Amino acid sequence: MPPMQAADLGKGVATESEKGKGIMKLYANKPRNYEKRYINILPATSQKKEHTMNAKQRMYQRIEKHGNDLKRIFNLDIDAIQISKKVHMIEVKTLRIATDYCNGENGIDSKTWEPETEKILKALDKVLNFKKQDIPVFVNGDVRGYALKIDDDYVRKYNLEIHKDWGGYGCLAPEFDGKE
């Protein structure tokens, strides 16, 4: 689509600096008094791309903030993004196992659920070191929510600044989509 020209909009005028920014001034026909209005003449795809980029930035900021929250809670000295990624990978595996448990698939049943959750908590402890600090982390078997959580009483007692679910449990690996 060719760029819009001032003639395309009737009484619009754009200075050279405004043309590059996709801004067009419109003047209403009013005697002795004119009103300056600005309209955006960038193509819709350009506007959408700009919005998407902002959503990605928001998402990464939230991931980094959550990683810093985890660092503070678990007294860790590694990169906030790395912590978030490692915990999120464990969360994804845990949700897959919880789904298998609920559906009775892939050999996960009431007998194999406990040993599987112990493996998960052991892997998570290697990243967060929560057992030595007596932080009550557990696996939630309900696939409708997050799988790795901190007990709600502990979150309230220490007033932890972390993403929480509706029950007040601290979520170790929430999803961040970048939406406001």
Image: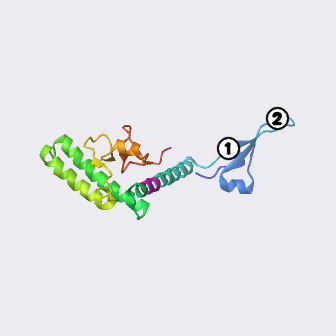
Secondary structure beneath label 2: loop
Rounded to the nearest angstrom, the CA distance separating label 2 from label 1 is 19 Å
Q: Residue at x 24, y 54 (%)?
A: 120
Where is mark 1, residue-wise? 39
Image: magenta residue range: 64-69
Outermost residue on the right side: it is: 32
Is residue 43 shown above or below 123? above
Give how far across and how far down residue 138 sits, in percent: 28, 48
Q: Main secondary structure of the magenta part?
A: helix
Q: Nearer the viewer, residue 64 or 34?
A: 64
Q: Nearer the viewer, residue 177 or 146?
A: 146
Q: Nearer the viewer, residue 7 or 75?
A: 75
- Mark 2 Cα shell of 10 Å, populated few (<14), some (14-19), many (≥20): few
Q: Does 41 sit left or right of 172 as displayed?
A: right
Q: Does 133 sit left or right of 79 as displayed?
A: left
Find out whether residue 11 is within the magenta segment.
no
Q: Residue at x 56, y 46 (%)?
A: 44
Q: Earlier in the sequence, mark 2 or mark 1?
A: 2
User: Can residue 106 be seen from the camera position used here?
Assistant: no
Q: Residue at x 68, y 49 (%)?
A: 23
Q: Nearer the viewer, residue 156 or 166?
A: 156
Where is mark 2, residue-wise? 30
